[in-house]
Amino acid sequence: MRCHPSHILLIEDNPGDADLVCLCLADAQAQVEIRCVTHLAAGLASLLECPPSLVLLDLNLPDSHGSDTFQRILETAPTVPVVILSGQDDEELAIKAIHQGAQDYLVKGSLTSLSLERAIHYAVERQALLRSLDMSRKQQIDFKNQFLSHVSHELRTPLTCIHQYVSLLFDGLAGSISPDQRAHLQTVLKSVHQLQAMIKDLLEATRAESGKTRIEPRCLALADLLRESVAMMQPLAREHHIHLALSVDSLLPLAYADPDRILGVVLNLIDNAIKFTPPEGNITVSASTMANDPDFVYISVADTGRGISPEALPLIFERLYQDPSSADTNRSGLGLGLYIAKEMVTLNGGQIWATSQIGCGSTFSIKLPKHSLAKLLMPIVLHKGRLRDSLVLVRVDLAPLPHVARAHWRETCLNCLDLLRRCVHIDTDLVLPPLAATSLEESFYILASTDMVRVNIMIARIAEQIAALPHFQSNATITVTAKPVARIATDYSAPLASQVEAVATHVTQLITADLHDKGSHSVTQRKQYANA
């Protein structure tokens, strides 16, 4: 629908006040088209159907009251200027409305044609200016991100060259060096590593801010990931004479997140804790669940360091922020680590926050979504209101050939996963979310609504189509196996959700046992396609 260029939407339930507004506009000889509605719902519908040049809004309507009324308008049409009309001369409410984004606040009892005309004119002009400033700000951010990305990429080449030649000298491959020279070269190498870390953080932060960061969520055993992170950081903790410990609940459920991203976040938090914890201090990495929040798994990194000031605590996750009270010797980065950590956790559907007390240490906490297999299985394992008679667990193992680079192998695995999802029947089969790999080999699982006789067709189709992928046979081998999912004893009078949960638990146990016994598969069928 084509809208009048000076179309005003008046949302007012009092006929007398609506007439007053129309009369004021008529006296001002304003060439405008006015549409009046009495309820917020009608106003929202009108905003969607034909966005006006401006909204005149009464906050107290039959179906909405107070600042929530304006908030709903703002959410529906954030670019349309709004002038509040109120029967009360309430300065606090007026200030709150302006802070929320209203362009002006008029009291009906003091309304004149001049004040209304002026408010409308200024509101439209201010909104246009704000849109222009917002567009300019976005362009500046895009330019800055492109500049930082370009400079960071260009710096990596000479920095890599410096690193290689200094390493040659340090290792004595260009001739013998004295102990003093070795110490100097070690200082150079340390600075090169610090610069490389800064450039990596700049690139990561730029990708995160521009929305180009890609995550690959998987079924994630947090206990294994945290053990790996603690093992990686243990030498640095010992070097600083700090005790680094791990505490994980024995029955910790699987999380659903990108393992590489979460590992990076945890390593960053442990590294920060080591920087700000004095010798003989303690750092504890833990994971647990909360009874009052059963859909999430919690990770925490707690230290006995100097703590974070109350003024700095709300700012520590902001880009480039560094606590001015921290010692200069602890500033080895750009203040991007926690900003990147927050972006990565948010992208994975989680939250990160910190609590601290000066002199008593800090605790950084993360909560990540728990992997719920039952929700995924519900449409697959049920048929005509009951559990299916037969299910088969198909396993697809990919192994790289010795010469394959890690980057190429990652791409190969992603291509295979995409093809697998196209190979199965969407209504009867499910490619389970991939598990976090503990080695270069990848294992994907499919739960198929079939039996061990007819699964042969699926196995042949999967193996042949993956083997036919471009460059696959020169990069990897594939093994496809299957095993039946035995019917479990369940109470068929129980709710269907409980029955599906029991099946999900059983399938999880099968996969866990299967992965722990990779060498021997109790299967009926096996096909392997490898490069000769």
Image: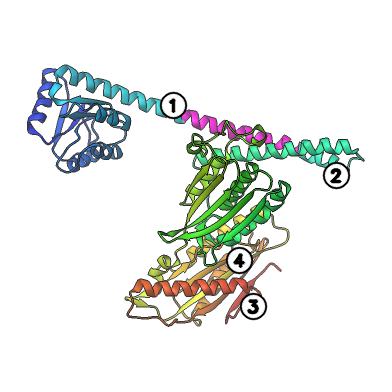
Q: Find disc 3 in the rendering and name its residue.
A: 520
Q: Residue at (22%, 23%) from the top-left corner?
A: 120
Relative to the observer, which residue lies in front, 524 or 500?
A: 500
Q: Quadrant of residue 522?
A: bottom right
Image quadrant containing the N terminus:
top left
Provide the residue span drawn in magenta: 139-161
Relative to the observer, which residue lies in front, 58 or 518?
A: 58
Position in image of residue 102 (x %, y %)? 28, 29
> Which marked residue is nearer to the observer: mark 1 or mark 2?
2
Relative to the observer, which residue lies in front, 127 or 66?
A: 66
Q: CA distance from mark 3 to mark 2?
A: 45 Å
Q: Amino acid at mark 2?
A: Asp
Position in image of residue 71 (x %, y %)? 28, 38
Q: Is 292 part of what is drawn in magenta?
A: no
Evaluate if marks 1 and 4 touch, with contact meaning CB atoms under 8 Å apart. Answer: no
Q: Secondary structure at mark 3?
A: loop
The image's mark for residue 171 is 2
Query: Where 204 falls versus 79 (above or below)?
Result: below
Query: Where 215 falls versus 455 (above or below)?
Result: above
The image's mark for residue 136 is 1
Q: Amino acid at mark 1?
A: Ser
Q: Which badge, 1 or 3, comes first in the chain's sequence?
A: 1
**Callout 2: few (<14), some (14-19), or many (20+) C-alpha neighbours within 10 Å?**
some
Evaluate if marks 3 and 2 touch, with contact meaning CB atoms under 8 Å apart. Answer: no
Q: Which badge, 3 or 2, comes first in the chain's sequence?
A: 2
Q: CA distance from mark 1 to mark 4?
A: 50 Å
The image's mark for residue 467 is 4
Q: Amino acid at mark 4?
A: Ala
Q: Which badge, 3 or 4, comes first in the chain's sequence?
A: 4
